[in-house]
Image: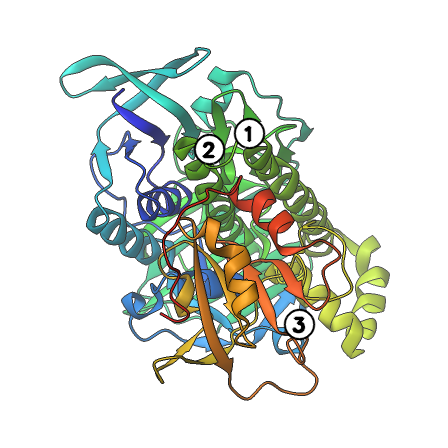
Amino acid sequence: MDASVVIVGAGPAGLMLAGELRLAGIDVVVLDQLSQRTGQSRGIGLTPRTVEVFDQRGLLPRFGDIEMSSLGHFGGIPLDFGTVDSDAQAAKTVPQSVTESVLEDWVRELGADIRREHRFIGLTDRADHVEVEVHTPAGRRRLTAAYLVGCDGGRSSVRKAAGFDFPGTPATTELFLADIRGVDLEPRMIADRVSDGMVMVGPLADGVHRIIVAERGAPPQQRTGPPPFSEVADAWKRLTGIDISHAEPLWVSAFGDAARQVTEYRRGRVLLAGDSAHIHLPAGGQGMNTSVQDSVNLGWKLAAALRGTAGHTLLDTYHSERHEVGRRLLANTRAQSLLLLGGTDVEPLRDVLTELAQYEDVARYFAAKASGLDIRYDVGRGANPLLGRRMPRLDLRLGTGAIASSTTLLWPGRGVLLDLDGTPYLRRRAAAWADRIDIVTATPQDVPASSPLEGVSSVLLRPDGYVAWVAPGSYHDLPSALERWFGPARHRSNTVASAR
């Protein structure tokens, strides 16, 4: 075969997936039809959950100095994301182009094969492999792989070629986006509803402003390219009274509020991640962030299937876990679309929600929705609230005396069993999985009394950072959890170190 996995699309979803697979030692080829990155950025910023994800792979320092903020919104209603328990704040000023640059450098260092000017044409899903037709600079070529993953965006050619159903609602409104220079505009970081629509202004680097404008009642147009800037400037003047026609447009785009999701994230040996699987109004920048998290969920499961340590039952949890996340994403962005783009008839609803958002519990609910911090997977029954949630950052003193964190232990992309009580019996029970997980004995540092980690003696982390088992609190025993998430035990005579 040409590769174990062929990924179509070198955007954030495709690159993140390539990195996750390479951490697991899987050979991967990434195809992209562009000769180089565009440098354009539909997405600006990282949600707290994505900041956590990048932190658990050691990627945050690669972004340099980034501005963090706890402020956000839900449909234009201001929120403080600090009301939600998280190790991280949102990164407000990170363009998607920077994220793609960081991820591409990372996956190249890990040995991923990125092939540009390779356009996907078609596929044939065989019983034991996938054949991928590609147009390359040298002509048409056929690649073979064990699996094919479409990360090629909302108009995904992979999705269409594989016959995925993509139900939902079509766009009803067209929005313009433009990055402009040479004009001084007052920031409007949260959507500003004006009499006949909605406008936003966000300052970027080097005197550039990003503007978004939507005129109420403006239906989507059948366009073969980006709209002329004059059309954007005219709409801006009609809504705000401000003339920006003299500005220098660096990038202009149009998008809509369509909401669609595939009915299944996997068909045989073809899978979808990111915008290939779900499209929606990009309220709060949730699209790119959800796409990255799709890939982090999929990568270790696909690697386990390829290594033979876990079968299709584990791989099937990619759909069951992420399809539900996508469904809830579409629900919240459709609600935000109504709040942002609706007419005067939604004002009473906005007034009520704005008043309710003053209550901390309500603000926490909306902030968790918009940030992805409310995600909880079904990992089995138990009383501990950590089960199925992402592990909070925990500072640890290892047996060597060194200080580490639960986050840094996840950098290699492996599962982690944290023995927080120094229990040899626990380590012996997990020893047969030592080829797939790191068994770490450590003493927790400064656990607040209110933390769900208070009184916990051991925690099993999946490679994506979610808690699969905890003691006390899980109704299943440790071997059952290990087998469910890491496959059957391999009885080996190797000695497991009690600390790393």
Q: Nearer the viewer, residue 270 or 243?
A: 270
SS of the residue under disc 1: helix
Looking at this view, is 370 or 387 the one in front?
387
User: Disc 1 marks which amino acid?
Assistant: His
What is the number of callouts on the image?
3
Q: Which residue is mark 2?
A: 305
Between marks 1 and 3 in the image, the one whose residue lies nearer the viewer:
1
Q: Quadrant of the N terminus?
A: top left
Q: Is residue 429 above or below residue 392?
A: above
Q: Are marks 2 and 1 in contact (CB under 8 Å)?
A: yes
The answer to whether any part of residue 247 appears in the image is: no
6 left or right, relative to 278: left
Q: Amino acid at mark 3?
A: Pro
The tag earlier along the polypeptide, 2 or 1, is 2
Label 1 sits on residue: 312
In space, the residues marked 1 and 3 are separated at their CA atoms by 43 Å
Picture residue at 53% right of the left edge, 40% below the top: 487
Say what secondary structure mark 3 lies in.
strand
Number of the front mark, 2 or 3: 2
Q: Earlier in the sequence, mark 2 or mark 3?
A: 3
Q: Quadrant of the C terminus?
A: bottom left
26 left or right of 277 in image = left
Residue indicated by mark 3: 78
Residue 5 placed where, x, y %? 35, 30
